[in-house]
Image (tube, coloured by chain):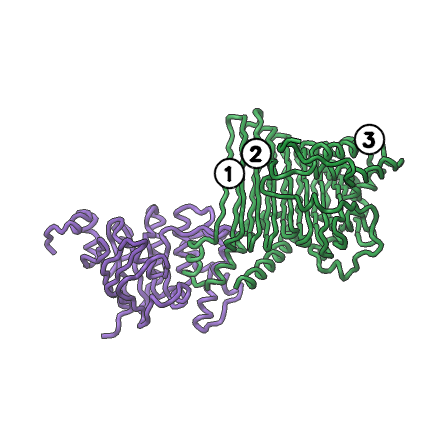
Chain colours: A purple, B green
C-alpha cells in the first residue's frame, strides 16, 4: 500500500495551558474527501489552524506527516507552497491591500517556490476571470481591499475563490458553511468539487450536515473532546444530524 | 506669576521688538497693520503654549521657544539650484509651481499658469495689489478662532504665501503646487508663510502644499493656511511635509466650507523634529462632505502631532477623519480629535479614526477623541488603536504563501495605503504612494 497523503498521529496540542487536542489520529489518502464533525469546543478549528501553521498552539505530542514530510517543522508559507490551504472560519479583513495584488503575489510566491515561472498581469487576469465564474463573484471584488467591508457570505466565497486560484493539494475548510444560505453553500461546494483530483484531498470541517449534501465525503469523523471517537461514511453525518452529538459523545450504546 | 498663567513674553523678546519693522513700513495698508497687531497681541497675551495647556499636553515646544527668532525678510541671495530641486517630490508633473525659499517667493524657480478668466493664482503679496478688498474682508477671519501663540506670531509677521482665487463655476485643471523650501542654514531662521485660498461656489481646485528643507539647521516653519470653500465647490488639499529632522514645523489649516461642497484635506507628515498641525474645519452649509485624512511616519526622536477641531454648524453634513501613524524608534505620534456638533446640526455623520502602528517598543502614541454633541439626531463615531502589527493578518497572508517579510511589508504598506487611497488626484496619489513605499522599504531594511 502506498504511503498515506496525510497522517496525523496521536496529536496533542493546546493553548495557554489548556489542552484541546488529546491524541487525534487521522489518515487521508489522495483523492479522498474527509469530513470532520463535532460539537463546539471539540477542537475542530484548532486542528485546522495547526495544519495551516498557526503558531499560537503548543504541540505537546504527536506529529503530522504530509506527503512524507514533517508538516509541523514547516513555516506557514512553506506549507502553502507545498499545497496546503486553509479556508478560514473568520477570514481576516486587510484594508489597504488590494485583492488582486495580494492574490497575484500569493500565487507567484507559490509558483516561484515550485520552480514555475511567475504569471504576468495578463495571464493572471485571464486565470482569475475563469476562476471567478466558479464562485460567481462580481469582478469589482478584485479591486476592493482583501475582505474589507465584505459581508460574511462574501468573505467565505472569497476564501473559495482564493482556493480555486491557488489550487491546493490539501484543502482544509474550517466551517466554511457557517452563516451561508443555500445558494452560497452550493457555490462553495462547487468550488470544492472543482478541486477534486486523484492527487488531491480535502478536509471539510463542519458543525452541520447540510454542506455534505453538496460535498460528498468518503469518510466522516466525529471529533469530541480532542479525539476522533468515531469514523464512518456519509451516512454517519445524517445520523448525527438526526440524533444530535449527545448520541455519540455521551457514549450511549449504538447499533452500527 | 501663578503657575497656571502662560509664560509671559518679556517686552525685550525679539518676537515683540522686531515688529517695529512693520510699524515703520508706510506701504502697509492700515487694515493689514491692524490684523498684524491683533496677531502680535494674541502672541504676547498667550505666549507659547506649555504642557499645562490641555491642547498641548503631549507636545513640548520648549525647544522652539528657546530658538533665536530670526524672521527671514528677504529672498536669500543664493537660491537653490535646479539640482537642489531635483530631490524634491511632485515636481515633474507640476505645471503650476510656486516656489518659496524661507517664506519668500522665488519667481525664477516658479512656473505660474497662463492667465485664466476668473482664476488668480499668485502670491499673497501680489494679490494685495490685485484683490485687496477680498483679502481685507477675509484674511485672518478663520484663524482667529485659535488662541494659540504660533498663529498669532504668523499673523503678525507673515511675509508671503500662496493666493488662489477661483471664481464661481471655474475649474482649475492643473493642481497648484506650492513648494516651501527651508534653506536650513541658520538656527532660528523663521518662515512665516501665509496661504489664502478662496474657492467660490461650484468651483474646482486641487492644491498641494509641499514643505521641504535643504540644510540641517534648526529652523522654524510657521505656516497658516485659510480656506474659504463656497457652496458646491470641490477642493482637494494635500499638505506634504518632509522637512529636515532638526527643524520645527507648525501649521494652522483653517477652513470654512459651504453648502453641498466636497473637501478632501490630506496631511502627510514625514519630516521635522517636531511637527504640529492645527486643523480647524467649520462645516458651515448643509449637506457637505469633508474628508480629513492624514498619515505620519516618524522615526528617531521625531514627534508628529495633529490637533483637529471639526465644527458641525449646519445639518446633514459628513465629516470623516482618518489618521494613521507608523512610529518607529523613540518617536511619538499625537492625535487630538475634537468634534463639536451644534444644536442645529441634525443628521450629522461624524466619523473619526486614529490608528497607530508601533514598530518599536520605545515608540509612543497619544490619542484623544473629544466629542461635544448638542444635536440629538446624529451619528458620531470614533475609534483609536495603538498597537503592533496584527498577528492574525500576518498569519493569514503567510497561510496564503507570502513569506513573513513580504507579509509585514504588505501590511505596513496597506496601513499607509488606507490613507493614500483617499487622495483623489491620480498623479499625486501615485507619486505619494511611491514616496511612502520607499520610506517603508527603508524602514524595513533598517529594522532587519
Callouts 2 and 1 in the same chain: yes
Labels 2 & 1 near each other (Cβ < 8 A): yes
Report the front residue among A186 and B159.
B159
Of residues A77 and B140, the one nearer the viewer is B140
Indicate the quadrant where residue B446 lies: bottom right
**Residue B259 visible in image:** no
How far apart are the two marked residues, 2 and 3, measured between alpha carbons? 33 Å
Residue placed under numbered mark 1 in the picture: B382
Q: Position of residue A139 (x, y in %)?
A: 49, 53
Q: Earlier in the sequence, mark 2 or mark 3?
A: 3
Residue position marked by numbered label 2 in the rendering:
B339
Closest to the observer, A149 or B38: B38
Q: How would you rate the neighbour count of disc 1 (Cα within 10 Å): few for under 14, some for 14-19, many for 20 or more? A: some
Q: Which mark sits nearer the N-terminus, 2 or 1?
A: 2
Q: Position of residue A99 (x, y in %)?
A: 49, 55
Residue at horizontal 22 percent and vertical 53 percent from the top: A225
Q: Secondary structure at mark 2?
A: strand
Chain under disc 1: B
Amino acid at each position: 500500500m502506498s504511503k498515506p497523503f496525510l497522517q496525523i498521529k496521536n496529536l496533542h496540542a493546546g493553548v495557554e495551558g489548556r489542552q484541546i487536542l488529546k491524541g487525534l489520529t487521522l489518515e487521508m489518502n489522495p483523492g479522498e474527501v474527509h469530513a470532520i464533525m463535532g460539537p463546539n469546543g471539540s477542537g475542530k478549528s484548532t486542528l485546522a489552524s495547526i495544519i495551516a501553521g498557526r503558531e499560537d498552539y503548543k504541540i505537546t505530542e504527536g506529529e503530522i506527516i504530509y506527503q512524507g514530510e514533517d508538516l509541523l517543522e514547516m513555516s506557514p508559507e512553506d506549507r502553502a507552497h507545498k499545497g496546503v490551504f486553509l479556508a478560514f472560519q473568520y477570514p481576516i479583513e486587510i484594508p489597504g491591500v488590494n485583492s488582486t495584488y495580494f492574490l497575484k503575489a500569493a500565487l507567484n510566491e507559490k509558483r516561484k517556490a515550485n520552480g514555475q515561472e511567475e504569471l504576468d498581469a495578463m495571464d493572471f487576469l485571464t486565470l482569475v476571470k475563469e476562476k471567478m465564474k466558479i464562485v460567481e463573484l462580481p469582478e469589482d471584488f478584485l479591486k476592493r481591499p482583501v475582505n474589507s467591508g465584505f459581508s460574511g457570505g462574501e468573505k467565505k466565497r472569497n476564501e473559495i475563490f482564493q482556493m480555486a486560484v491557488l489550487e491546493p493539494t490539501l484543502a482544509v475548510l474550517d466551517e466554511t458553511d457557517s452563516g451561508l444560505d443555500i445558494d452560497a453553500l452550493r457555490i462553495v461546494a462547487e468550488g470544492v468539487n472543482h478541486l477534486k483530483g486523484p492527487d488531491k484531498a480535502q478536509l471539510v470541517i463542519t458543525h452541520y450536515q447540510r454542506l455534505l449534501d453538496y460535498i460528498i465525503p468518503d469518510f466522516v469523523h466525529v471529533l469530541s473532546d480532542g479525539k476522533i471517537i468515531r469514523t464512518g461514511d456519509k451516512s454517519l453525518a445524517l445520523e448525527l444530524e438526526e440524533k444530535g452529538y449527545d448520541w455519540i459523545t455521551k457514549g450511549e450504546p449504538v447499533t452500527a | 506669576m501663578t503657575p497656571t498663567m502662560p509664560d509671559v513674553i518679556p517686552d525685550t523678546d525679539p518676537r515683540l521688538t522686531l515688529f517695529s519693522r512693520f510699524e515703520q513700513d508706510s506701504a502697509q495698508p492700515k487694515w493689514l497693520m491692524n490684523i498684524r497687531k491683533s496677531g502680535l497681541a494674541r502672541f504676547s497675551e498667550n505666549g507659547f503654549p506649555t504642557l499645562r495647556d490641555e491642547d498641548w499636553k503631549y507636545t513640548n515646544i520648549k525647544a522652539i521657544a528657546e530658538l533665536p527668532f530670526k524672521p527671514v525678510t528677504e529672498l536669500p541671495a543664493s537660491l537653490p539650484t535646479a539640482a537642489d530641486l531635483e530631490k524634491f517630490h511632485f515636481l515633474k508633473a507640476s505645471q503650476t509651481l510656486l516656489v518659496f525659499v524661507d517664506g519668500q517667493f522665488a519667481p525664477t524657480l516658479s512656473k505660474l499658469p497662463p492667465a485664466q478668466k476668473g482664476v488668480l493664482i499668485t502670491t499673497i503679496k501680489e494679490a494685495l495689489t490685485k484683490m485687496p478688498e477680498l483679502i481685507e474682508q477675509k484674511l485672518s477671519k478663520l484663524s482667529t478662532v485659535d488662541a494659540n501663540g504660533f498663529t498669532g506670531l504668523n499673523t503678525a509677521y507673515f511675509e508671503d504665501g500662496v493666493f488662489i482665487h477661483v471664481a464661481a463655476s471655474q475649474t482649475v485643471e492643473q493642481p497648484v503646487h506650492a513648494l516651501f523650501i527651508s534653506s536650513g542654514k541658520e538656527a532660528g531662521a523663521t518662515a512665516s508663510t501665509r496661504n489664502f485660498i478662496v474657492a467660490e461656489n461650484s468651483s474646482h481646485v486641487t492644491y498641494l502644499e509641499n514643505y521641504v528643507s535643504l540644510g540641517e539647521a534648526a529652523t522654524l516653519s510657521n505656516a497658516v493656511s485659510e480656506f474659504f470653500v463656497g457652496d458646491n465647490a470641490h477642493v482637494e488639499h494635500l499638505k506634504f511635509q518632509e522637512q529636515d529632522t532638526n527643524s520645527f514645523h507648525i501649521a494652522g489649516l483653517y477652513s470654512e466650507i459651504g453648502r453641498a461642497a466636497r473637501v478632501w484635506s490630506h496631511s502627510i507628515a514625514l519630516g521635522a523634529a517636531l511637527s504640529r498641525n492645527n486643523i480647524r474645519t467649520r462645516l458651515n452649509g448643509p449637506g457637505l462632505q469633508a474628508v480629513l485624512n492624514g498619515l505620519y511616519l516618524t522615526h528617531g526622536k521625531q514627534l508628529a502631532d495633529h490637533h483637529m477641531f471639526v465644527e458641525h454648524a449646519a445639518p446633514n453634513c459628513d465629516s470623516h477623519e482618518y489618521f494613521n501613524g507608523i512610529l518607529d524608534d523613540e518617536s511619538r505620534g499625537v492625535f487630538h480629535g475634537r468634534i463639536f456638533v451644534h444644536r442645529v446640526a441634525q443628521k450629522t455623520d461624524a466619523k473619526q479614526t486614529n490608528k497607530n502602528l508601533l514598530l518599536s517598543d520605545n515608540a509612543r502614541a497619544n490619542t484623544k477623541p473629544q466629542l461635544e454633541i448638542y444635536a440629538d439626531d446624529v451619528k458620531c463615531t470614533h475609534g483609536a488603536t495603538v498597537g503592533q502589527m496584527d498577528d492574525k493578518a500576518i498569519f493569514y497572508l503567510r497561510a496564503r504563501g507570502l513569506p513573513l517579510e513580504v507579509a509585514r511589508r504588505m501590511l505596513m504598506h496597506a496601513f499607509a495605503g488606507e490613507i493614500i487611497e483617499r487622495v483623489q488626484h491620480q498623479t499625486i496619489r501615485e507619486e505619494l504612494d511611491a514616496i511612502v513605499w520607499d520610506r517603508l522599504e527603508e524602514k524595513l531594511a533598517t529594522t532587519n
